[in-house]
Each structure stands twice: as structure tokens, then as C-alpha cells.
Amino acid sequence: MARRSVRYAVVDAFTDTPFKGNPAAVCLLEEEAGVDDNWMQNVAKEFNLSQTAFLVPSAASVAVSEVSAFSYPRFRLRWFTPVEEVKLCGHATLASAHFLFTSGLVKSEIIEFDTAFGILTTKKVHEFRKLDSAEPYPNGNGESFSIELDFPLVQVVDCVSEEIPSFPETLKDLPIVDVHKTSFGDLLVELTSGKELADVKPNLVELKRCAGRGVIMTAPAPPGTGFDFFSRFFCPKLEINEDPVCGSAHCALAPYWSRKLGKLNLIAYQASPRSGILDLQVDEGRNRVLMRGKAVTTMAGFLMV
């Protein structure tokens, strides 16, 4: 690959406060020529964040500020952990949209991403239910807004009997209500209370050996918090001991809690040390989950490669 500069930003997603939420690196490639998977994997390893996103304008000969042949600006989008590429990532998609909206690279308030999961639509939303007491943090250009992701609904199914014996021993002493798994292969463990969930200290060695790709833990939110449910996500198999705020996990959590609580609109809190807030809407007719969140750019520059 010829030496070039690649524009990047590090964006904290699902938060309006710097150094909270889930950080993702976003790299803008003017074209895919000369860029291979090994290079992208090495860049993701260098950033060493839970996800690094790579964007390429879908019409390379057209300025990225233009709509080109599509209804809205469209970019090819891929996501890499430090060890492998993943099929779907919520927070790095939100970070990518935030980067494009705030950098002036697009004029539209809707962006389409061409991904392994098909076309994912993101939209700038100027009204957002603010739940914390902090003042809004400007999104890089003085404008405060949230971003809505239109994502696929992920099914939650029962675990088969042979998967239960590999369930981590350190989790068996917790007040577990039920154990399921998602169509992504993650275990989904419901606990009795959000407080119990926030206090969990899992054995990561055991989690790395268990049947699931990762372990989503969830519980009803404590009364008076303003949230519907809490969650945490552990995925040491992908070198993500705890994902601070996982959008793709909420593609399964949203329909799961929607059915349990009998409501389509939910406010979720990811109870990781960095924490984050997701505003969710379940559209079962379309098999989609709409999730809204804010984002903050904390770092920007150029990779010299």
C-alpha cells in the first residue's frame, strides 16, 4: 500500500459527556484501492478500542459532500475489533455518522451505510429525551443533536441443553431469572435486579471458555431511575473484556424487554464503568430496532501509513 494520510476521529458514542459511553475510532478512506483486510486489522489493533470503523464513499469519483447517485449520501462501512472483523456494531455506526455530520463532509441529515448486514440508515434527530442532569455537550460544531440508527432486530431463543454445562461457574451464584441466547450466539442472562447487575465481577477466563461468543447480562432497572432496564456485555473472546455500551446487544435486548414489559419504547442504561444511555423503539412489523444516542468527538487527526 502506497504511503498516504488517512483522516480519523475517536468518538465517544451513546453519551454527551467526553470520556463516557463507548469510544470508537472512525477512519475515512477516499478509496478502497490499496487497502486490504490485513491493513485494516492492524489499524484496529493499533487503536486497541472495542471497534474501529472504516468508511469509504460509495461513489469514489464524487465529492463526499454530494448525494451522488443515491437518495442520500452512502458510505461503505466495516467494523473491526482488535482481533477480527464483526458483522454488526451499533456504537461504531453511531460514531461514524457523528463524524460525518460534524465534520461537514455531508450536508444531508440522513446517511446510508452499506454493510455486511445490508443498508443501515442513520438520521440526525434534533429532539432527544435527556435523562441526566449534565448540560448538553456541543457535538463539535456547537449543535446538540442525537443520532437515530435503524438496525435489524436480533432474535432471542432458548439455549439447548448441551450449552448449559459450559455456563460460567462464577455466574451460577448470581440471582439468575433465566438464560437465553441470541441469533448472534451470545448468551443472554437475566438477573433479578439492576443493583445485582452493576455489582457483577465476572471471571473473564471462564467467560472466554463458555459456549457463547459473549455474555449479555441484563436486569430490570431500579425504581425511580427513569430507565426500563440495565445491561452489561462481556466479550473476552474478541479481546473486549467489557464493552462499555453495545448497540448490537440492544438489537436483542430491546425486543426481549419489549415483550416482558409490554411496551415498544424503552430507555436503557448500560451499567459499565463508563456507562451509556440508549433510547429504543421496537418495530416488530419491520423486524427493526430504532436506537437513539448522542456522541462526542474526543480526538481527531491523520494516520500516516
Image: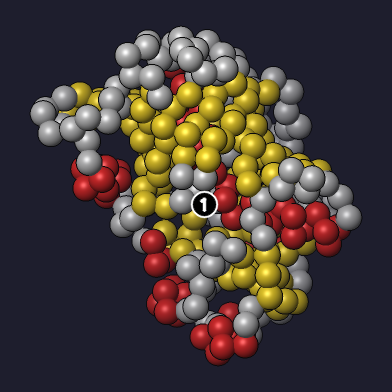
Q: What residue is at 30 percent from the left and 45 percent from the top?
A: 44
- Which residue is the site of mark 1? 244
Q: Is residue 50 above or below residue 14?
A: below
Q: Position of residue 182 (x, y in %)?
A: 61, 65
Residue 289: which quarter of the image? top right
Residue 124: which quarter of the image? top right
Q: Position of residue 228 (x, y in %)?
A: 79, 52
Q: Would you call the spot at circle 1 few (<14 residues within 10 Å), some (14-19), or many (20 or more)?
A: many
Q: Nearer the viewer, residue 293 or 154?
A: 154
In the image, taking residue 224 as reference, residue 164 lies left or right, namely left
Can residue 148 be seen at all in this image of the molecule?
yes
Q: Identify residue type, mark 1.
A: Pro
Q: Position of residue 53 (x, y in %)?
A: 39, 38
Q: What residue is at 41 percent from the left and 32 percent from the top?
A: 76
Q: Nearer the viewer, residue 301 or 272?
A: 301
Residue 1: which quarter of the image? top left
Q: Is residue 217 above or below residue 152?
A: below
Can residue 98 be seen at all in this image of the molecule?
no
Q: What residue is at 76 percent from the left and 32 percent from the top?
A: 129
Colouring rule applied to residues: secondary structure
Name the element at disc 1. Answer: loop
Residue sticking out furthest to the right? 262
In the image, taking residue 228 as reference, residue 77 lies left or right, namely left
